[in-house]
Image (tube, grey):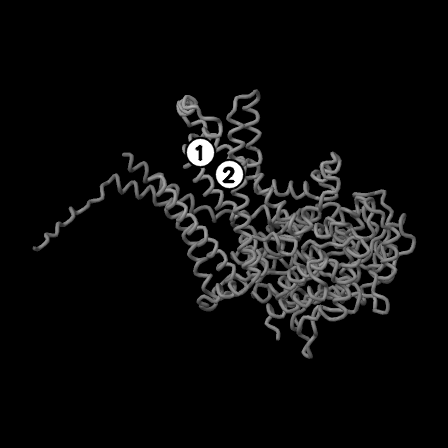
Amino acid sequence: MRRVAVAAPARVIGAQERLAYLLLAPALLLIAALIFYPVSSTIATAFFATDKLGRLTSFAGWANFGALGADPAFWQIFRRTFLWTAIAVTVKTIAGMAFALLLNLPFHGRRVVRMLTVIPWALPFPISAMIWQWTYNSEFGLLNHFLSQTGLWPHPPAWLAQPTTAFAANLAVDIWIGLPFFALVFLAGLQAISPEFYEAAEIDGAGPLSTFVSVTLPVLRPVIVMASLLSVIWTFNDFSVPYIITKGGPINTTDILVTHLYKTAFQFLDFGPASAIAVITFATLLVFSLLYARLYFREVE
Amino acid sequence: MHRKLALAAIAMLCTGILALPAQGGGAVSIKAVWMEYDARFNTFWQQLKQDFEKTSPGITVDTVVVPWSEGHDRLVTWIAGNQAPDIAIVGTRWILEFNKMGVVEPVDTLFPKAFLAKFIGPALEARISGRLYGVPVALSARSLYYRTDLIKTPPQTWQDLLTVAQQANKPPDVYGIGVSGKKFAELTEYVYYLYGNGGDFFVINADGGYGKCRVNDAAGVEALQFMVDLANKYKVTEPNVGENDRGTLQDLFLAGKLAMIETGPWFGGMVQERAKNLQFAVAPMPHNQGKKQQTLLVTDSIIVFKSSKHKDAVVKFLQFAYDDPRRLEFDKDFGMLPTETSVSQNSFFQTAFYKPFIQQLPTAKPWPLMAEWSKVEDVMWNAVTAALLRAKAPQQALTDACREIDQARGVK
């Protein structure tokens, strides 16, 4: 049997449609110039050797990636970035939920507290990082002064002077900055839950915990998924906190991929390897986002 | 109708965007990038700009002041983006790297001979293969600052230094001597101990070039071991060495918490301004017993970028900036040593404060001049900090560092 090819009706772009494209054109051009061009040029640079100005000199194939793979320091930083992201996002999600539940309770001054909660998120991140750098200072900083004066910790460590404490100190600041975002997004989610659900749960004799597990969490699920996905991307790429507070030190022990990338590019002028790090970061986050989205949509279905 | 309006709007938007880069034509404008020196006041550059513009109609100076710790990376970003300024202050040690990029104009043909003849020998450091690539702007030698209320006789050798530090050390109120373990724009204080122990960073090849890394030899390791012992064995430093860089060590001294600190001449003015009651004096940098006294000499230079379209205006501006009264003003404001013979004879420099600095100049040694210096410095910082934090023994740390440095420089 012969299939009859049905010719699609010749599409005439209507005047209105043309106007739409015309109006979109400046924005599309800007997106192409500001996103598509840098991304593709970075990907290209990752496969080339460059001079100290970042101009491509010769095709290098996978050599930049190979050199990174053979560098134990890179793997250390790669693993550390995952650890950094995992701890920070987990804590932010759980603590953000706790905060949201508290802020959802009726109490006097709730509006003021809600507003105050936003402050760490509303401040420019580099400024927060600078304030914390001074707060952590072991000689002049508020934190150790407070800890030792109140007797809570008579001899607190010099936080930024040792690798482990410096890493923890950086994490704490990242969490401090990111927490309000979770708290507010979750709070908005909580307020959108119809009181009828809770009434029904109460009639069924559910306690607070089982209400939370079987009513609040399932309804909030999409919000939790989106907030934590965004936070993974932001935390993975958090430059201002580790770069300003410790500059990745001591001994590069607080470097994460993005600070390592910056140093490779602008301190050592190795633009090829730096672009390779950028491509790896991009690919890692892309794969993660795709898996995450797939998991999420499958569950929703 | 709507369509016509929309089209008109787009057309206007486009012309608007196109018109943007066309601003400010006509007069010659020089973009100058200055680095932020530790200073009592930072009005020098603004004043210079105003004075110059008054006497030179038609030329304006666009001044950008950048902190030292960001200076290198910012310049690189500008250069890479084809946005290099006309002139910039750089650490002379950066010039090799910039020259390798092919962006630095030699200054020996740009300026008249008489202009370059003003400078004292050690200041003209920016020579590469016989050409001069930078006009000296700042010169410093490093010395030991000590509190005269705590220390009567300044130490001359490391052995004296340890004794004096032990006597003055009264933690947590006062620590004997400051040692920094946090990365800074230069490798303080390891270089002072290295040079004061007859050590060096690289073997010098027969042709004068830099060969293999040698900080892991006896002199280099002994220097680092001494720093580590000050911090960990004798505990005469501030306890949190990993947290401090040169800047915060200076803050500690100003707060009265250090009996001794090793830094440059600018710090004298800072003490007078910020800690008036602190009694201090300056002495030559201590050295290991039996070794030659030697300290670090640092010069900063002004480079002219090849891409500058107004080199005549640049030359005119710098000649204006380099008259003696202005240079004296610069040295006073920023606490630098004189770079010109005529300025060095000024009575301002004939004081007890400046004596140790000037006295050390003839034997003082500069940083190595190499294109890979920022990588070398980063690796060295990691080694020094690792030893100070006891993550590695000094010998191990420096051997690892040398391996990494030689590998990065492609030296076998």
Foreground residue, B293 or A194? A194
Q: Which numbered circle lies on residue A93?
A: 2
Q: Look at the picture and state if B39 lies above or below A272.
A: above
Q: Residue farthest to the front? A: A205
Q: Look at the picture and state if B340 lies above or below B167.
A: below
- Estimate the x, y position of residue A66 in percent, counting from the top left: 49, 66
Q: Quadrant of the C terminus of chain A?
A: top left
Which badge, 2 or 1, comes first in the chain's sequence?
Answer: 2
Q: Secondary structure at mark 2?
A: helix
Q: Secondary structure at mark 1?
A: helix
Q: Residue farthest to the top? A: A108
Foreground residue, A46 or B106? A46
Q: Amino acid at mark 1?
A: Leu
- Estimate the x, y position of residue A108 in percent, counting from the top left: 57, 20
Foreground residue, A148 or A265? A148
Q: Is residue B309 visible in this depiction of the protein? A: no
- Estimate the x, y position of residue B395 in percent, counting from the top left: 72, 66
Q: Quadrant of residue A136?
A: top right
Relative to B179, is B278 on the left or the right? right
Bin the neighbour count of mark 1 within 10 Å (Cα to Cα): few under 14, some 14-19, many 20 and up: some
Q: Which numbered circle lies on residue B277?
A: none
Q: Which residue is mark 1?
A: A217
**CA distance for labels 2 and 1:** 12 Å
Instruction: Identify the chain of the residue marked 2, using the numbered disc in the image.
Output: A
CB atoms at circles 2 and 1 under 8 Å apart?
no
